[in-house]
Amino acid sequence: MEKAKVLFVAQEITPYLKESPMGTIGRYLPQGIQEKGREIRTFMPRYGSINERRNQLHEVIRLSGMNLIIDDTDHPLIIKVASIQQARMQIYFIDNEDYFQRKYTLHDKNNKFFADNDERAIFFSRGVLETVKKLGWGPDVVHCHGWITSLVPIYIKKAYCDNPLFSDTKVIYSIYDDDFEEPMHKDFANKIKLEGINTKDLKHYKGANYVSVIKAAIDFSDGVIIGSPKVNPELVSYLKETDKPYLEYQPMDRYVDAYNDFYEEVMVNDHVIVD
């Protein structure tokens, strides 16, 4: 029997960023799922704070070189890769000079939310999916961690759903305590648009903030995991009003088994994303 393929799309992975609960899951979950006999791929942004020499990142020339157009501007897509030797695991990094070669991750040195975080999220999400297309590797499950990955569900379900690599893909979104207070760019909804995404699909992105962006991710996912002990209560209420399968927060000593079982549940669930 063919191994199930699981794609991990992560905002943070230890040791590339300062240790955090999300980063720890980003590091150890893929390893644990791989050890359970599944095939994996893992992606994160190549933030400027990541030391390329120390972490031995190198560009994958055959995957780089595409341009993604966002808001009528071309942005070159650079793909880098590094290995976590003890886990026998590769991490792919999405890079671009305009979006990711700055010293800080999502806030500047004064803790101010980057004004272009909307475009960084768009570029990262589309960059991951375009790279997976180039790899010719169709995931059975895509598991997203962190708000910067929150556009992956709408893109898979609406813009990439006719691609045979993604037509049967199940999307799982993990909600964390990664709230931000600032509003997203006022043109966020227009910038997201790709063929296949209609105005109704974009309802949460008009005047978007953290809560509405995650609500949209819930809408376009097949299953949801509560990834932190405490998450925004408005999102928990919204999730419970949907009929999505969801998994409550799991302690660190048993989350790998619980997530693996949840993947199985979602893969056999015929729940359909309603237009």
Image (cartoon, helix red, strand yellow):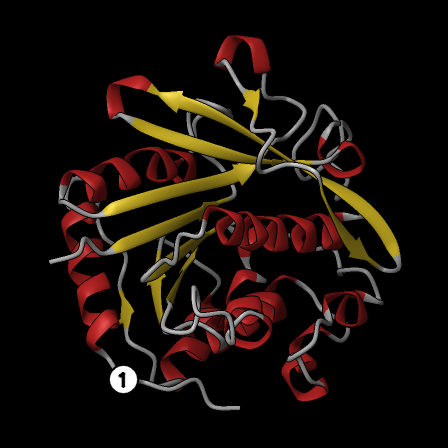
- Residue located 58% across and 34% down the image: 62
At label 1, the amino acid type is Asp
Is 141 on the left or on the right of 80, as rendered? Answer: left
- Please identify the quadrant where the N terminus is shown: bottom left
Query: In front: 253, or 74?
Result: 74
38 lies above or below 253:
below
Query: Where residue 9 sits in the image (x, y, percent)?
Result: 46, 48
Residue highlighted by disc 1: 270
Q: Secondary structure at mark 1?
A: loop
Query: Where residue 165 sits in the image (x, y, percent)?
Result: 43, 64
- Residue located 41% across and 41% down the image: 42
Query: In front: 31, or 237?
Result: 31
- Residue located 54% across and 55% down the image: 129
11 lies above or below 153:
above
Query: Where residue 75 sits in the image (x, y, percent)?
Result: 79, 45
Is 211 on the left or on the right of 117, as rendered? Answer: left
